[in-house]
Image (cartoon, helix red, strand yellow):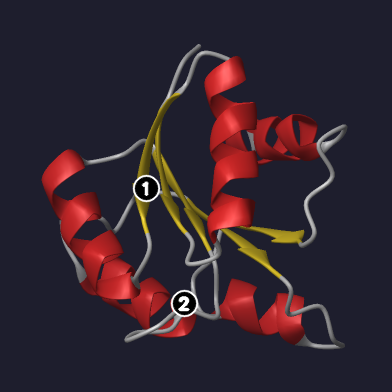
Amino acid sequence: MHYKILIIEDNEQNLYLAKFLLESYGHVVLTALTGIEGIKLAESSQPDFILLDIQLPEVNGYEILEKCKKNKQLFNTPIIVVTSYAMAGDRERCMSAGANGYIEKPINPDTFMQQIEEFLLN
C-alpha cells in the first residue's frame, strides 16, 4: 500500500534521506521546513501520516502535536516523531504529547522503513 506522507523537518540532509527512502517504496512525500508550514500543509493535503521533528524553527514539535490533536481535520492523523531527542524521558514526553510513534535520529537507512511499517500496522 502506498501512503501520502508529510515530513516536517528543518534539517535538509535528514529531510532528503527520509524522503528518498519513502519515495523508493512508492510513497508520495510532501515536505515542510518549519512547523507553521507543516501545519498548513497538513490541513490542506490531509496526509495519511506525519513524520515530525521536535526541534523546529517558529513552532516546535510539541506545539505541532498539540495543534494537530486539537484540529478536527488532523486529530486522527498518526504522527511519528523522528528526533535526536533521545535522553531518558524524551520518548515518553513525545508519546504523552500525542505522538503515535518515536524514531531516534540519526535514522538508519537499513531499518527506517521497517520502523515506519511497524507503526502503520499497529
Query: Does residue 37 sit above or below 6 in this rendering?
Result: below
Give the residue pinned by disc 1.
Answer: 31
Residue 1 percent coordinates (x, y) = 50, 11
Q: Amino acid at mark 2?
A: Gly
Name the residue: 57% across, 43% down: 16
Residue 51 relative to residue 44: left or right: right
Mark before the other along the chain sequence, 1 or 2: 1
Residue 19 relative to residue 75: left or right: right
In which quadrant is the C terminus drawn?
Answer: top right
Q: Residue furthest left?
A: 44
Residue 23 percent coordinates (x, y) = 53, 22
Q: State which quadrant residue 64 falls in.
A: bottom left
Residue 73 relative to residue 100: left or right: left
Residue 4 relative to residue 21: left or right: left
Name the residue: 38% across, 63% down: 33
Name the residue: 47% across, 21% down: 27
Question: Is the residue marked by circle 2 packed among few (<14), some (14-19), or many (20+) residues within 10 Å?
Answer: many
Q: Amino acid at mark 1?
A: Thr
Could you tell me if the residues under marks 1 and 2 are in contact, i.e. CB atoms within 8 Å? no
Q: State which quadrant residue 99 falls in.
A: bottom right
Q: Which mark is residue 61?
A: 2
